[in-house]
């Protein structure tokens, strides 16, 4: 369980860093283009960033939760890293 928790903490931290980078690009693009799609992407990225910050907070401070629920949450956090990584790669192209 500790290894999975450490992996989820690392994944949440990586997600936060990647989302900050993507948001940096999207905000810069929005300032130039003022496209509604870009603004929607900024809102989506901000909500996803907030979710990852809260998840990381709970990974460090939350009381004991049911093992199965925690494992599923951590697995989803790790899978989310792959999705955000792909989004970051595409954004920087």
Image (tube, helix red, strand yellow):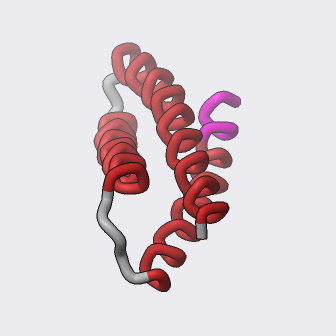
Q: Residue at x 48, y 38 (%)?
A: 16
Q: Residue at x 35, y 71 (%)?
A: 64
- Marker count (numbered): 0
Q: Residue at x 70, y 30 (%)?
A: 93
What's the magenta region? 88-93
Residue 61 falls left or right of residue 20: left
Residue 87 drawn in magenta? no
Q: Residue at x 43, y 17 (%)?
A: 28
* Picture coordinates of residue 50, whole percent (x, y): 31, 44
Residue nearer the viewer, 21 or 39: 21
Q: Quadrant of residue 45?
A: top left
What's the magenta bit mostly, secondary-structure-wise? helix
Above or below residue 22? Residue 85 is below
Above or below residue 18? Residue 48 is below
Q: Quadrant of residue 80?
A: bottom right
* Picture coordinates of residue 44, whole percent (x, y): 34, 47
Instruction: Answer yes or no: is residue 44 visible.
Output: no
Q: Quadrant of residue 63?
A: bottom left
Above or below residue 15? Residue 6 is below
* Picture coordinates of residue 1, whole percent (x, y): 60, 70
Residue 84 falls left or right of residue 62: right
* Picture coordinates of residue 82, whole percent (x, y): 66, 55
Residue nearer the viewer, 71 or 83: 71
Residue 89 drawn in magenta? yes
Instruction: Answer yes or no: is residue 64 visible.
Output: yes
């Amino acid at each position: 369980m500790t290894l999975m928790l450490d992996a989820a903490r690392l994944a949440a931290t990586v997600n936060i860093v990647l989302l900050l980078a993507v948001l940096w690009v999207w905000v810069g693009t929005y300032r130039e283009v003022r496209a509604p799609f870009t603004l929607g992407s900024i809102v989506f990225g901000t909500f996803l960033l907030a979710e990852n910050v809260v998840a990381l907070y709970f990974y460090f401070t939350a009381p004991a939760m049911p093992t199965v629920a925690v494992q599923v949450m951590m697995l989803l956090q790790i899978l989310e890293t792959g999705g955000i990584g792909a989004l970051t790669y595409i954004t920087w192209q």
